[in-house]
């Protein structure tokens, strides 16, 4: 590591950069095959009929193609979409190059995936906006790939900001600008608000964070339970989570809340392949080297009670998840509001580890 | 279509093909078996679009024709029939009447035309191999195939045709099993292909100790023709990792082990390997191996084996399951274990061309 003398800092406000590579996998593929330039390109599950796209470039997005969209649906929207298989070894190599650049500026780097990271640059003498500019420039020079950045006093604001001028852009939100920035922000941009909560908020007449600010803590608690307390802070742009370098994930899961509850096991089973594909894609992207010790299925029922079935020693496969799902469903027979699939990892710092051969 | 056959023949025929049928499918036709009655045979075909099997059974065909019927349902009905004589008659709407003794069943099928045809192999490269050799090779390797779907090229068995050898390789990234089979084929037929697990499992079910199997390698697919049965499968696309590089070229210590004795000891000791750590330790001293396992707050196990060993004293830990798998699938009385040190892969060998490379586990103490 370089001579960074300004590591830790209690300085307030903090300066956080959220750095997000622009359609990372697709961009790498287009860079490596210049003939693809200007054409709609997707990367991911072409080798299987039930495949899901991991990512796609902006040309493809113009046709309504999105990341995590099933391949067949993507092809319906954009029949001339070029679908390439993933090359994770290449992506990982590029990611390592990018991380090396990030560590030149701060040791407080929290990678979220191969193509996304938070940086805490509070202690850096440079102003965070120009700093982000420099980092993006270095990445472009080294990898010929563009990145977008969001700069803010916390992770929440930085993350939302990085999405605003994509691709190849950046947005800085100064601490004093946060209230105004949040005012018009749609609530769905907040972490944890998906389809179901979003609809519920709409019914309450809440579309933006500004609208939400008019609700008291008690109102939010009543409507959204514990999550409501969090929402109270989130809609004000308050987020105290520190940037955690080298945070080791203990588990990885993928879950979905359904707009209508699922009544039968077979209805639940129908949802499995997609959840599974997404989990696998996520796993390959984020934690492809970890040893999986357990797999689990979590169900949340219509009455918000929940149950989790987990089993050690199983590799994550659709069949294994299906049998766990059947077991979890049989426990209550209640209609299901949410299904989550996940894996737990062995602690890498464990005393005993199976050494890899390949 | 109308035919009669013995219950046994019908069951045997269905058993060969029914495992391919997927239990849950979005295409109902894939749950069905295609029946084609012609001459004095009824051909049966099933497919899940990745793997397909075609077999046949002897029958007295009164009226030729074809239909498709739900495979599992048909199988369970035939299995329960009271008499050994079975008569099947299918009307123009693909409804099958099954009569046997006092029983009558009517099950509804789907038209033959909806059934996806098995792929054609026009310009395939054909290699012939003794069924017994392939069966033996698959048994010695297939248990090491990875089930980790994030490493999909490892979710199958490598068939490497090179220099008049068929090399079969399976690995999950922690251990690797490999077998060489001598085989004659032209240079132009050399290829590296990855056959998916499901096809390997089906193939193992179909192979016998007699006769030959004709392997046809087409683009992206493979067919195995076993006298009366045909198995076709898509191949896994991608490059198999360079497995040669993980096979140690040197060895420091070699011990000869009695396979069954060693397997039994491992099995007993592993009872005290915990779920969490799941390792057993081999402690080598002069002419002796101590196999040990312990689980904190549960207990420990130890077993000593007298062996001819003259090397240095050292300990190495392995996942017991990974160690027992090859021992269970080999038939030889004696196996050789080659070791270098506690952090390098161990290699299990026998007299014939077989290798099992296993990475040890790292233990802090």
Image (cartoon, rainbow, N blue to C red):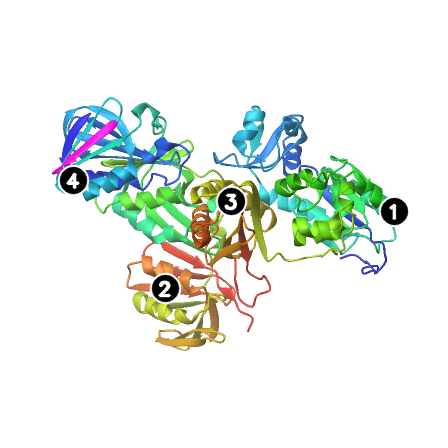
User: Does mark 2 fall on the same chain as mark 1?
Assistant: no
Disc 1: which residue: A176
- Label 1, secondary structure: give it: helix
Q: CA distance from mark 2 to mark 3?
A: 42 Å
Quadrant of the rendering where the N terminus of chain A is positioned: bottom right
Q: Give the residue displayed 76% in from the left and 55% down from the top.
A: A240
At a point 36% along the width and 54% down the height, the residue shown is: B354
Callouts 4 and 3 on one subunit: no
The numbered mark 4 sits on a residue in which chain?
Answer: B
Q: Are marks 4 and 1 in contact (CB under 8 Å)?
A: no
Cα distance between the residues tagged 1 and 3:
43 Å
What residue is shown with label 2?
Answer: B336
**Could you tell me residue B191's position as x and y percent?**
41, 38
Distance Cα–Cα, label 4 vs label 3: 41 Å
Query: Element type at marker 4?
Result: helix
The residue indicated by pointer 3 is A276
Q: Residues within 10 Å of mark 3 (few under 14, many from 20)?
A: many
């Amino acid at each position: 590591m370089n001579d960074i003398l300004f590591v830790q800092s209690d300085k307030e406000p903090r300066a956080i950069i959220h750095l997000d590579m622009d359609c990372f996998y697709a961009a790498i593929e287009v860079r490596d095959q210049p003939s693809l330039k200007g054409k709609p390109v997707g990367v991911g599950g072409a080798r299987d009929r039930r495949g899901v796209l991991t990512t796609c470039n902006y040309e493809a997005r113009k046709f309504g193609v999105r990341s995590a969209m099933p391949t067949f649906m993507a092809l319906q929207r954009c029949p001339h979409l070029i679908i390439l298989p993933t090359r994770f070894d290449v992506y990982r190599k590029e990611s390592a190059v990018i991380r090396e650049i990030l560590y030149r500026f701060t040791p407080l780097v929290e990678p979220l995936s191969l193509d996304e990271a938070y940086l805490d640059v509070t202690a850096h003498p440079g102003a965070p906006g120009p700093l982000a500019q420099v980092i993006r420039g270095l990445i472009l020079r080294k990898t010929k790939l563009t990145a977008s950045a969001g700069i803010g006093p916390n992770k929440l604001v930085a993350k939302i900001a990085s999405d605003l001028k994509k691709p190849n852009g950046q947005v800085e939100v100064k601490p004093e600008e946060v209230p105004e920035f949040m005012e018009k922000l749609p609530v769905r941009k907040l972490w944890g608000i998906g389809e179901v909560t979003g609809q519920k908020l709409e019914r309450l007449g809440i579309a933006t964070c500004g609208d939400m600010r008019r609700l008291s803590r008690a109102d939010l608690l009543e409507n959204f339970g514990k999550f409501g307390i969090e929402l109270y802070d989130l809609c004000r742009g308050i987020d105290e989570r520190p940037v955690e370098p080298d945070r080791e994930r203990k588990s990885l899961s993928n879950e979905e809340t359904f707009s209508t509850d699922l009544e039968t096991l077979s209805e639940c089973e129908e949802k499995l392949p997609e959840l599974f594909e997404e989990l696998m894609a996520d796993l390959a992207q984020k934690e492809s080297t970890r040893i999986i010790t357990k797999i689990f299925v979590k169900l949340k029922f219509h009455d918000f009670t929940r149950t989790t079935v987990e089993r050690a020693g199983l590799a994550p496969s659709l069949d294994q998840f299906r049998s766990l799902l059947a077991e979890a469903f049989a426990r209550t027979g209640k209609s299901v509001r949410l299904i989550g699939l996940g894996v737990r990892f062995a602690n890498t710092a464990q005393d005993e580890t199976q050494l890899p051969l390949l | 279509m109308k035919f009669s056959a013995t219950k046994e023949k019908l069951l045997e025929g269905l058993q060969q093909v029914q495992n391919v049928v997927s239990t849950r499918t979005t295409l109902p036709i894939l749950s069905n078996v295609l029946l084609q009655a012609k001459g004095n045979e009824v051909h049966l075909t099933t497919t899940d679009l990745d793997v397909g099997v075609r077999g046949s059974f002897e029958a007295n065909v009164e009226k030729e024709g074809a239909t498709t019927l739900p495979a599992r349902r048909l199988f369970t009905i035939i299995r329960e029939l009271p008499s050994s004589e079975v008569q099947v008659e299918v009307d123009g709407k693909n409804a099958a009447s099954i009569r046997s003794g006092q029983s009558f069943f009517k099950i509804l099928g789907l038209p033959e035309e909806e059934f996806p045809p098995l792929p054609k192999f026009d310009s395939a490269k054909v290699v012939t191999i003794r069924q017994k050799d392939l069966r033996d090779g698959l048994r010695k390797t297939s248990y090491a195939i990875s089930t980790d779907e994030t490493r999909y090229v490892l979710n199958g068995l490598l068939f490497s045709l090179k220099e008049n050898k068929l090399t079969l390789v399976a690995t999950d990234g922690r251990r690797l099993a490999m077998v060489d089979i001598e085989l004659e084929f032209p240079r132009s037929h050399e290829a590296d292909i990855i056959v998916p697990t499901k096809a390997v499992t089906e193939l193992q079910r179909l192979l016998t100790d007699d006769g030959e199997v004709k392997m046809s390698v087409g683009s992206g697919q493979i067919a195995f023709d076993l006298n009366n049965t045909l198995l076709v499968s898509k191949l896994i696309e991608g490059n198999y990792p360079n497995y040669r590089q993980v096979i140690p070229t040197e060895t420091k210590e070699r011990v000869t082990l009695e396979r069954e004795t060693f397997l039994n000891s491992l099995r007993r000791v592993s009872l005290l390997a915990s779920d969490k750590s799941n390792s057993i330790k081999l402690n080598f001293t002069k002419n002796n191996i101590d196999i040990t396992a312990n689980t904190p707050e549960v207990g420990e196990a130890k077993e000593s084996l007298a062996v001819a060993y003259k090397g240095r004293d050292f300990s190495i830990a392995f996942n017991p399951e990974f160690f027992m798998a090859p021992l269970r699938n080999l038939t030889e009385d004696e196996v050789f274990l080659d070791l270098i040190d506690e952090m390098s892969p161990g290699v299990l060998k026998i007299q014939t061309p077989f290798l099992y490379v296993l990475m040890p586990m790292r233990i802090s103490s």
